[in-house]
Image: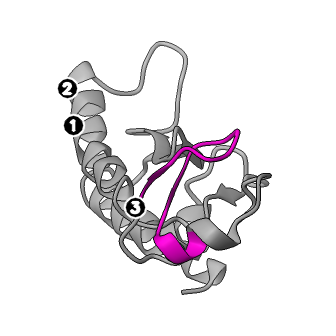
């Protein structure tokens, strides 16, 4: 799966110059997370998609942020519940290749990787 397949998410970024800061192994997961979120929040606003503590961080608001509020708290809770499922799934998926992975703490940065990728990725954590 190439980075181009994440195009459907691009128009949701608050900052259009944002990049998807996750490895290729998580792209299908990111796309499925988007599909789950957009089904309930068609106008959702995306702040960041990145790896945080070896798990997927999909940071979004139910709608574009607006002074005075643009959603009710139940909507934020619902969005967080949708995203939490994919964050939990990412803890068992290699961020580099998409195979089954586990938490690796052999570098300054924590990553979720399979055994093969664990032996390939260097100390700088670049995938
Ligand atoms: Zn791997």
Name the one closer to the observer, 72 or 20.
Answer: 20
Q: Is residue 96 visible?
A: no
- According to the image, label 2 marks what residue? 74
Q: Where is residue 64 in the image (x, y as percent from the top left)?
A: 51, 37
**Left or right position of 119 against 97:** right
Q: Which residue is drawn at 30% across and 57% down?
A: 89
- According to the image, label 3 marks what residue? 34
Mark 3 lies on a secondary structure that is: helix
The CA distance from mark 3 to mark 2 is 19 Å
Quadrant in which the C terminus appears: bottom right
Which of the 4 quarters of the picture holds residue 72?
top left
The CA distance from mark 3 to mark 1 is 14 Å
Residue 78 shows which numbered tag?
A: 1
Q: Where is residue 45 in the image (x, y as percent from the top left)?
A: 51, 44
> Can you say whether 96 is above or below 42 in the image?
below
Q: Where is residue 50 in the image (x, y as percent from the top left)?
A: 59, 49
Q: Is mark 1 within 8 Å of ligand 1?
A: no
The CA distance from mark 1 to mark 2 is 6 Å
Mark 1 lies on a secondary structure that is: helix
Mark 2 lies on a secondary structure that is: helix
Q: Give the range drawn in magenta.
A: 102-117
């Amino acid at each position: 799966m190439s980075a181009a397949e994440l195009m459907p998410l691009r128009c949701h970024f608050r900052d259009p110059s944002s990049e998807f800061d996750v490895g290729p192994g998580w792209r299908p997961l990111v796309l499925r997370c988007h599909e789950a979120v957009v089904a309930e929040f068609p106008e959702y606003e995306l702040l960041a998609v990145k790896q945080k503590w070896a798990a997927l961080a999909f940071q979004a608001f139910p709608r574009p942020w607006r002074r005075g509020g643009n959603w009710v708290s139940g909507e934020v809770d619902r969005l967080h519940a949708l995203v939490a499922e994919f964050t939990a799934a990412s803890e068992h998926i290699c961020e580099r290749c998409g195979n089954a992975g586990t938490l690796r703490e052999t570098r300054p940065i924590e990553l979720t990787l399979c055994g093969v990728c664990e032996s390939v990725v260097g100390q700088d954590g670049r995938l």
